[in-house]
Amino acid sequence: MSAPDKTTAGQAPASRPITSKSPGSKSPTGKPLAWDDFRLINAIAERRTLPAAAAGLGLNHSTVFRRLGQIEEAVGTRLFERHRSGYVATPAGEEMARLAERFDSDISAFALKLAGQEIKPAGELRVTTNDTLLVDLLTPVFGGFLAQCPDIRLEVLLSNQALNLSKRDADVAIRATDHPPETLVGRKAARIAWALYGLAADFPEGGSEPIEALWQRSWVSLGESFAALKAVRYLAQHVAPERIVYRVNTVLGLAEAVEAGIGIGFLPCFIADRKPALTRLAPPDPGFSADLWLLTHPDLRHSPRVRLFLDYMAAELGRMKPLIEGGLALSSRDAP
């Protein structure tokens, strides 16, 4: 974090370092500093505007403004310089923000260790995954787990982004990736296969045509946010842009588009192979596959509820491997 511009007009006198070293200690004026005071200063330092900091803390703008004034009065020095570009921390503000980050990290680590020492599998379990895996694969499995473990409550958080498991944003992450974060531990449950699909009514002979003969057809694809996906890169390299008539930023929507006859496209086999209206136009391409991982934080892997959940999910997904890995294709003549 850069130091404030010393040429700014009306700059306050140089701030002095705060002397409080832990939440709850007293400020130079004798008023105690609370943990929430440190959190507020850190939020402003990170986001640089009061509205953004207020949104992150779940407070309103006027509350953050008032509390900042109270904290600065308590510590006896200015913690931020007000610039047109936003709030820039003074050296004292930077020190207070660093302390807040350290406290937050220590508190999160302590909470993780406590969670890892649970005696019985009970309580809330927070699981993050994406909408595609949830809707077309995981929801029935979650239901089976809850039926066997009635003392556990699941909270499912849908996100394509990696949540911070070290801060307990979630306890378990279920992700399709070939590169799981090194900070997490877990197991690979299966490998997700992708293949090319179209309407069975439009392709009565299934995948009898070579893929090169399909380049001039109408195609559907995932949007730019999925540009790193192997199937998306392949399509961009081989199909003319004007032939990609439909883009969507969710795999669920992509499957719906193929089923609606908008175009042909690459889909995960576990979705498309359970749709009788679709047929494979080419076998699964191993180059498009991605590993399906069950991940958790190292401090939580011995928690009874986490361990029980991971074991159950690994067993159930293991039984579903033929579907996930593309071994259960339906032809246009097969029943579901």
Image (spheres, helix red, strand yellow):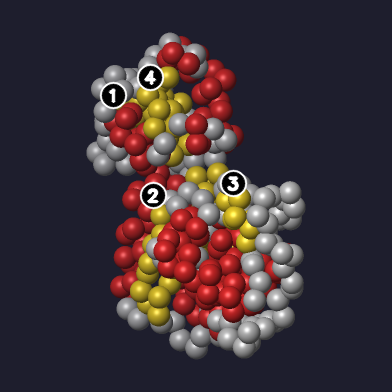
Query: In front: mark 3 or mark 4?
Result: 3
Where's residue 177, x and y in %?
57, 48
Q: CA distance from mark 2 to mark 1?
A: 22 Å
- Tell me if mark 3 has few (under 14), some (14-19) or many (20+) residues whose alpha carbon lies within 10 angstroms of its own: few
Tag 1 or tag 3, which sits nearer the N-term? 3
Question: Measured from the top left, where is residue 314 in percent x and y?
Answer: 49, 63
Label ID, residue 261: 1
Q: CA distance from mark 4 to mark 2?
A: 24 Å
> Given the image, on which type of amino acid does mark 1 rest?
Gly
Give the residue type that dot 4 points to: Val
- Residue at the spot of label 3: 85
Q: Is the residue marked by circle 1 packed among few (<14), some (14-19), or many (20+) residues within 10 Å?
A: some
Q: Write down the quadrant of residue 312 in the picture.
A: bottom left
Q: Residue at x 39, y 47 (%)?
A: 132
* Contact between labelled residues 1 and 3, with CB atoms less than 8 Å apart: no
Please name the residue shown 67% across and 83% down the image: 28
Q: Earlier in the sequence, mark 2 or mark 3?
A: 3
- Front residue (pair 40, 234): 40
Q: CA distance from mark 3 to mark 1?
A: 50 Å
Comparing marks 2 and 3, which lies closer to the viewer? 3
**Mark 1 secondary-structure assignment:** loop
Q: Residue at x 67, y 50 (%)?
A: 9
Q: Place residue 293 in its image quadrant.
A: bottom right
Per the rendering, the mark at residue 131 is: 2
Distance Cα–Cα, label 2 vs label 3? 37 Å
Q: Compared with residue 154, is residue 114 higher up or lower down, i.e. above or below?
A: below
Amino acid residing under circle 3: Ser
11 or 294, nearer to the observer: 11
From the image, tell me which residue sits under label 4.
Answer: 245
